[in-house]
Image (tube, rainbow, N blue to C red):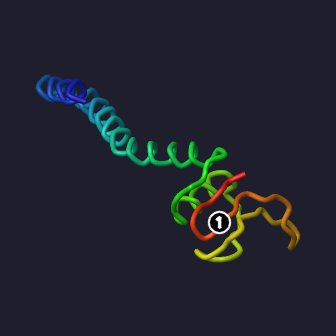
Amino acid sequence: MKQHLSQMLDALIKDDEKGAEVAFQQYMVSKTQEQLKPEQEEARQEITEARGERIQTYSAWRRACKQKAPDVRFDGDKDICNASVWKDGKPIKAVGEWDGEKGYVS
């Protein structure tokens, strides 16, 4: 990141508008990637938990199901819930199950 800033400053000093713009774009990309890392790590942990392990919270279980199948449909609530993919008004694939305390993703 510091490298991009120094490139941008050098380009500005040399009155190189194009070089400064490129350096700024590189800086913004690196800054955006840094901000995404915690969210990506959380998503990775949820996927890991979803692979045959029990998930501890209802919201984490719902996110894991959505990651597994973006078109998932939830039938139930925090007390008990099933997640499945539907087609033509019928469930065609089970995605997960919440028992009120822990969840599973298949």
What kind of residue is marked 1? Trp
Q: Element under label 1? A: strand
Is 106 on the left-hand or right-hand side of 103? right
Q: Residue visible at 57% across and 42% down?
A: 48
In the picture, measured across the screen, residue 7 lies left or right of residue 66, that is left
Q: Position of residue 12 (x, y in %)?
A: 15, 29
Quick check: 89 left or right of 28?
Answer: right
Residue matched to label 1: 98
Left or right, 45 with reference to 27: right
x 33%, y 35%: residue: 30
Return the residue nearer the eye: 66 or 3.
Answer: 66
Q: Nearer the viewer, residue 27 or 22?
A: 27
| Quadrant holding the N terminus | top left
Query: Which quadrant of the view contains residue 36?
Result: top left
Residue at the image point whose x is 82% and y is 58% from the top: 93
Q: Which percent across, then down, holds residue 65?
A: 64, 57
